[in-house]
Image: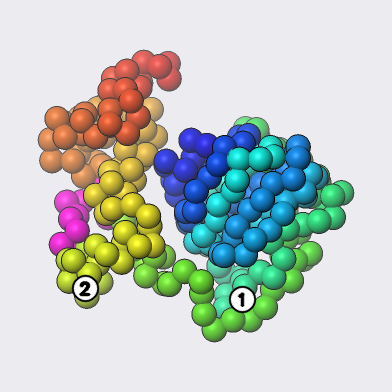
Amino acid sequence: MDYESNRDFSEFSGISTNLIKEHFHRSIELIYCVKKDRLCVVNGQNLTLKMGELLIVPPFFLHEYDNDGVGFCHVLPVEYSDLWDKYTHSKSIDNHIITNKDLAKELFDHLNTAVTAKNKLLKTASYEYVLGKIFAECCFTSTDHHAIPNFTKDVVNYIEKNFSTDITLDLVAKHFGYSKYYFSNLFNKYFKINFKTYLNNVRISKAKAMLKRHTISEVSDACGYNSLQSFFLNFKKITGVTPGEYVSNKN
């Protein structure tokens, strides 16, 4: 699943059959099971997603899947996570799986409409309809805690806003009031990846979108790289091609 190497940066839609190790991201993830039951773990809860059912993974919930079964995965654009948080403030979803197969198929169809829609109004309406039905059909319980500490949300949002600047592990640690080493340990624990690698994934994912309308030099500067050489090295390390080759392949 290519999305998992570029989390939090764009919508994703595609078939999911691989073993997906434990991870989390800022975006809402929905999986519609199209063939064979699939074992899933969401925030430590073992679930069986049956054919024709829809799995709901809220923002920042740890989740993983085995490699049995075939699911169609939809990762919603990140702005819909704000809508989720606004509606579910201080509440946690009780049922992660929509077992009503008619409803699950209806939502799956609307997700497909959203992904293929060229009309922005239709795309927005389709995504909001899906979330509206989830909010109406699923049960939510008030809770005084979150399974993933606010630390992760705050760090993700900070990097999202500041990736274009010369941020470092030292600076971010100081911003959050931690020592460099303690912050690094916390980051590795919750993100399952080190700070430098995560930051580069953010920057290169942003760069891929920018290369559609800006020069390579402009993109390098806009993504926080101090030199073109550093940008080229990181871009090829993450994507397997140079920025120029990436642009050529997209044309």
The residue wearing badge 2 is: 178
Left or right of residue 120: residue 35: right
Report if the CB atoms under discs 2 and 1 are less than 8 Å apart: no
The image position of residue 38, as x and y in percent, is 69, 46
Residue type at mark 1 is Lys
Question: Label 2 to label 1, Cα distance in Å?
Answer: 29 Å
**Residue 99: numbered disc:** none
Answer above or below: position of 38 versus 156.
above
Residue type at mark 2 is Tyr
Answer above or below: position of 19 versus 137.
above
**Residue 91: numbered disc:** 1
How packed is label 1: few (under 14 Cα within 10 Å), some, or many (20 or more)? some
Reading the chain from its start, which is encountered first: label 2 or label 1? Answer: 1
Q: Which residue is at 35% across, 62% downward? A: 189
User: In this picture, which residue range is highlighted in magenta?
Assistant: 161-171
* The image quarter in which residue 69 lies: top right
How packed is label 2: few (under 14 Cα within 10 Å), some, or many (20 or more)? some
The image position of residue 165, as x and y in percent, is 20, 51
